[in-house]
Image (spheres, rainbow, N blue to C red):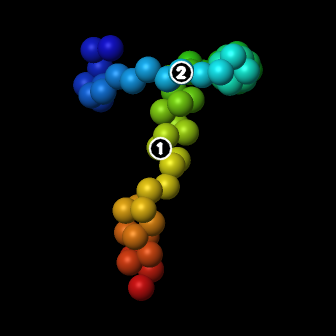
């Protein structure tokens, strides 16, 4: 992982059915698991993000 954007590495423990679902999704889409997981994390909403969007709409 020598890419400039890689600042933290994590390990995720998955149940066998979760790992199987991720693997099937990656096979179907042709995308690596790291990209799929990264996209899902980016889609998470946090309280600070909600507050920013709420204050921007006022």
Q: Taking 47 as reference, is 27 above or below it?
A: above
Label drawn at residue 42: 1
Q: Quadrant of the C terminus?
A: bottom left
Badge 2: residue crowd in 10 Å (few <14, some 14–19, many ≥20): few
Nearest to the eye among marks 1 and 2: give it.
Answer: 2
Whether residue 47 sits left or right of residue 1 in the image: it is right
Give the CA separation, mark 1 to mark 2: 19 Å
Residue drawn 44% across the image and 20% down it = 11
Residues at marks 1 and 2 touching, judged by CB atoms closer than 8 Å: no
Label drawn at residue 55: none
Q: Taking 43 as reference, is 33 above or below it?
A: above
- Residue 46 picture quarter: bottom left
Residue 29, how many percent across, how many down? 69, 23
Residue drawn 53% across the image and 30% down it = 37
Q: Quadrant of the N terminus?
A: top left
- Residue 25 picture quarter: top right
| Front-most of residues 12 and 4 | 12
Residue 56, how many percent across, how many down? 39, 76
Q: Is residue 29 visible?
A: no
Look at the numbered disc 2 and give the secondary structure of its residue: loop
Residue 13, how many percent across, how many down? 53, 21
Residue drawn 42% across the image and 62% down it = 47
Look at the numbered disc 1 and give the secondary structure of its residue: helix
Label drawn at residue 13: 2
């Amino acid at each position: 992982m020598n890419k400039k954007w890689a600042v933290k590495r994590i390990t995720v423990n998955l149940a066998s059915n979760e790992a199987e679902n991720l693997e099937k999704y990656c096979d179907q889409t042709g995308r690596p698991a790291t990209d799929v997981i990264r996209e899902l994390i980016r889609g998470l909403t946090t309280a600070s993000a909600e507050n920013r969007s709420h204050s921007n709409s006022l």
